[in-house]
Image (tube, rainbow, N blue to C red):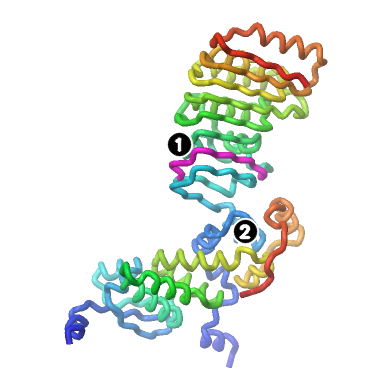
Amino acid sequence: MPPKNKKRDSRVVAPDILSYLPENIIDAIVMHLPLRDAVRTSILSKKWSWCCTQLSQIKAPKLRYFAFTGKIIFISLKGVPLLAKLSLVDTGYSEKAGKRGITKFLESFPALEHLHLDYYSVRFFAGEVPKQLRSALNSLKRLHLSDISLDELDVASCALYLTKSSPFLQEIEIEVYDEWIGPAAADVINEILEQVEGLSEVTSNHLIAVKLTGITCTDPEMELIKLLLAKSPMLAIMLIKNGLGAESPETRLKLLAEITQFQHASPKAEVVYELT
Amino acid sequence: MASTTETKQKKMLILKSADNDEFEIEESVGVQSETIKNLVEDGFTFVPLPNVYTKALIKIIDYLKKHANKTDSNDEEIKTFDKDFVNTTFDDLFELVSAANYLHISCLMNMLCQTIADRIKDKSPEAVRKIFHINCDYTPEEEAKIRKANAQAFEGQFDESLD
């Protein structure tokens, strides 16, 4: 008897069960896996790798807190109406800049109170940063951006857009990664400055605390500090921790001294410098 | 007997498997499958299922019958039934999941995908490939690159067993 018939008679599942299982079944199985195991399936074959990029739409109607370090291209948070704290650190930075628009991202989290994004995740969402505000993070109280660069147009615009979209923000922490290869070109700096100046449209009525670390007193940083002081009537404390930067310590001190001359909207605002 | 008259009044359906076996079931049992429900709504009482083989169909009819009689009191019984239902080989699970997918029985689909996921989750990629009969089409270089890029996911010991 030819082997083909034998196989059919005993009803053995076809050896190439992979091409036999429809993609939606593979997707469904992968979605039932814990994330780490799901990521591991990308190595099975090219077809699975493709499926993995469509991975893990997280629907969790009661989810309150979500912290993720990994390739954020693999996850999509939708249907998380109660999510209050979100932390994303992206390690899949290679070619994924601007993969998703920031506005779409913001719309997914109506209840978000604390948001932490690192440089690569900001960059990931820096796709289309609209000039005008579209949606607001009305619940956001704390915004924390780590390892950020204010010398790159897309990242800086996205970071500023987040700030502008959060009218009830009480606390901002920006950690500038101060070992970026070199300062940006003059025209980029000018464009970033324009973006920073956009902050003057909004008054941060609820902002109480600002923490800025790795500050090297670049023009965008100085402008940001100036505007935050000028537009935050409730500000109690601004902590500035300097970074290494290219300038000599003297120049840096001079620049920091300039900050003391900035106008404060809040009479009780205290500016604290921490020099390294 | 009362039950005989009841049976006579019940609407029945005939399901025909891919290997031409026919099964008579109550309509109320069959319509848990969206695919069957749509056909019933269009007036069909004879339902050919060219993608579902007899072996899987027998098990699925069993499942549908059990779940059609779900009440508050037989919760435990159904749980035990479900547990036994998925206690089978991977190949059987794949056949069942394909059938559940074709028949659009979402609770069964969920249960089977969850079972498969639970059973492969700690396994090595090599074991998962064997289980799914996957021929790896990556070059060793490509594979090394993916491992490197997702290093965290590949750390630690994995289960090499195939059951």
- Mark 2 or mark 1: name the one nearer the start of the chain: 2
Outermost bottom residue: A1
| Viewer-proximal residue among A173 and A19 | A173
Q: Residue A17's quadrant in the figure?
A: bottom right
Q: Nearer the viewer, mark 2 or mark 1?
A: 1
Mark 2 vs mark 1: same chain? yes
Q: Is residue A88 magenta?
A: yes
Position of B128 compared to A276: left or right? left
Residue marked by disc 2: A37
* Residue B116 sits above or below residue A229 on the image: below
Q: Residue A86's quadrant in the figure?
A: top right
Q: Position of residue A78 (x, y in %)?
A: 47, 45
Q: Is residue A18 magenta?
A: no
Span highlighted in magenta in the image? A80-92
Residue marked by disc 1: A111
Quadrant including the N terminus of chain A? bottom right
